[in-house]
Amino acid sequence: MPRTLSQRWSDFAIARPTWSQLIIFSALNVGMTVLQLVMMPLVRIWLGATALEDVTFA
C-alpha cells in the first residue's frame, strides 16, 4: 500500500525537525501575504463606500 502524504510528512518532520519548521513557516508566510494582497483591494472598495474616505488628518 502506498504511503500517504501525511505519513511521509510525519517521517520527514521527525527526521529533520528544523527543515520541517522552516517549510511550515514559509508556507504560512506566503499564505498570509497572498491573503493580504487579496484583501487590500476589497477593504479599499468597502471603506471607499463609507464616510471614512473624507476624513483628513492634519
Image (cartoon, rainbow, N blue to C red):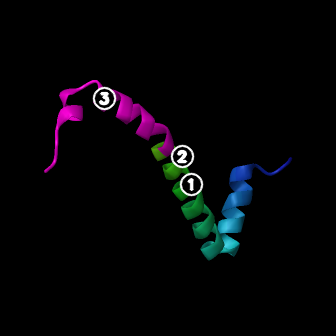
Mark 3 burial class by Cα count in 10 Å: few <14, some 14-19, many 20+? few
- N-terminal of the pair, mark 3 or mark 2, is 2
Q: Residue placed at 71% from the left, 66% from the top? A: 12
Which mark is on residue 30? Answer: 1
Q: Residue placed at 70% from the left, 74% from the top? A: 15
Q: Are marks 1 and 3 in contact (CB under 8 Å)?
A: no
Q: Are marks 1 and 2 in contact (CB under 8 Å)?
A: yes
Q: Which residues are magenta?
A: 37-58
Return the x and y of residue 6 as percentages of the image width and height: 68, 52
Return the x and y of residue 16 as percentages of the image width and height: 68, 74
- Left or right: 17, with 5 as reference point: left
Return the x and y of residue 24 as percentages of the image width and height: 58, 61
Mark 2 burial class by Cα count in 10 Å: few <14, some 14-19, many 20+? few
- N-terminal of the pair, mark 1 or mark 3, is 1
Secondary element at tag 1: helix
Secondary element at tag 3: helix
Compute the Cα span from label 3 to label 2. Answer: 22 Å
Q: Nearer the viewer, residue 28 or 46?
A: 46
Residue that mark 3 sits on = 48
Residue that mark 2 sits on = 34
| Amino acid type indicated by mark 3 | Gly
- Left or right: 47, with 31 as reference point: left
Mark 1 burial class by Cα count in 10 Å: few <14, some 14-19, many 20+? few
| Amino acid type indicated by mark 2 | Val
Secondary element at tag 2: helix
Compute the Cα span from label 1 to label 2. Answer: 6 Å
